[in-house]
Amino acid sequence: MSAFKVVFSSLKTVVSPLSAFFAGTGLTCCAFSLLSSTLALRMTGNGIDTAQAGIVLSLYYLGYVVASLTSYRIINKVGHIRTFCAFISTFSAVVPMHYIDINPLFWGALRLFEGYCIGTCFLCLESWLNTRANNKNRGIIMSLYMLSTYLGSSLGQLLLNIPDKNGMVIYAVVAGLFSVALVPISLTALPAPDISVHKSMPLKELYHKVPVGVVGSFASGFLVGAFYTLGAIFAKNIGLSLEQTSVFMFCGIFGGMLAQLPIGRLSDKFDRRFVLMWTSGFLFLIAPWMYYLLGCGMFILAGSAILLGCGIFVMYPISVSHTNDKLEDSERTQASGKLILLQSMGLIIGPIIISAMMQFFGNICFLLSFSVVTGAVIIFTFKQIATKDVGYVSNTPTAPQPVAPTHVFMHLSENSGMFSKVKAALKSKRH
């Protein structure tokens, strides 16, 4: 019990200064998750064929990719808070326009722009978050960030059950959620990153600096994209019922949520490259056996899916944390854009390759692909560990923020060398 209290206390210390940040992230994810599912269902209900609907929905990812390549210029010019608020507000205004016309070309244009808005917002959030973290707590902070995104996305799916006779209620709810998401971010006392100094970070330079982070981010997108896009198709093809399919998908995502905090804490205590290799090894070993276990009853199905999710959904936060451990604050915005780009490329490429393999060689290729990708990650990471020192930036420019930030504490956090002097002075006054 005492050990639990220590862990809870340390977690509270980390979470408290970032609670507004995580609340804004969760509300944002809840809103766009609800909108994405609503649009998919309404296109199907209006007789738009699956292929055409898939193209329209995939334009969202194209906008996401464009944002990862270009929107850092806006952030570096006006700052993280203003950029986030501007694009979330714009997205909120665009959402009701889906009600005007269901023409696929019109919706495709809206999805492209919406993808750009969300890509820019996540670039703000991830670069800002990694600026406020340090090498000793970055893993747990990234885990909490991912937890808030998954939790928000899951809650968004539950809101699909809201009664909507005229077809406008859901759009109003989505717009409202985006507007509310602005409140905690706009009012946070957490200082935004300094944008007066920023450095370029080409992808080639980022790979040279952090090869494991680059490869891990792409591999993560590859596997996550395959699970989200093809998981239900795989479950249906192997004979699972609709109920079993929903349990498989839910438990996979739930397993990813369960793994975030323990893996995040583990990555803060050890070289993150080893943690990435261990988690990849776990997925490498268990994935092929799932093919024979998923049909053995609901309990085994749920447990197998949870284990699968534990391996799939932890790769990205570990890779991002490892990358930012080796960067200065001035490099984080552009580096975050490159990591988002790499994951987006994986999200697009993974389902295409794996679906083709499933069609030509059978459904087991869905699970075998997880072993193939993680096997490649293990070999690559082991080679990097054997040939290169980790080379972390030992002293990050930003110190952890106090629970209730004030101007005095912000000043102390920027001048950490003064803290010991102030502490000594206060102690001498007491005596």
Image (tube, rainbow, N blue to C red):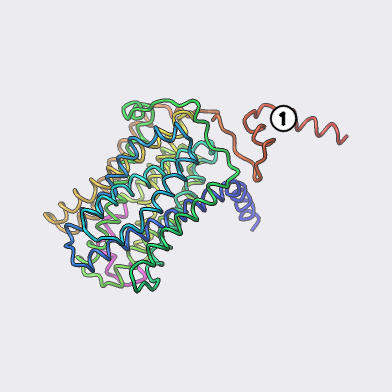
Count the labels in the image.
1
Q: In this view, does 77 lie to the left or right of 64?
A: right
- In the rendered image, the quadrant that contains the N terminus is bottom right
Q: Decide whether residue 297 is among the magenta residues.
A: yes
How many residues crowd mark 1 within 10 Å: few (<14), some (14–19), many (20+)?
Answer: few
Which residue appears at 25% of the width and 70% of the height? 240
Which residues fall within the magenta stretch? 285-301
- Using the rendered view, name the quadrant where residue 381 is placed: top left
x and y percentages locating residue 424 in the rendered image: 78, 30
- In the rendered image, the quadrant that contains the C terminus is top right
By secondary structure, the bulk of the magenta-drawn segment is best described as helix
x and y percentages locating residue 420 in the rendered image: 72, 30
Residue 378 visible in the shown view: no
Q: Is residue 160 left or right of residue 262?
A: left
Residue ranking furthest to the right:
431
Give the labeled residue for mark 1. 420
Residue situated in front as seen by the camera: 255 or 12: 12
x and y percentages locating residue 142 in the rendered image: 47, 45
x and y percentages locating residue 58 in the rendered image: 25, 51
For the residue marked with disc 1, what is the amino acid? Ser
Residue 349 visible in the shown view: yes
Secondary structure found at label 1: helix
Residue situated in front as seen by the camera: 421 or 362: 421
Q: Is residue 304 left or right of residue 359?
A: right
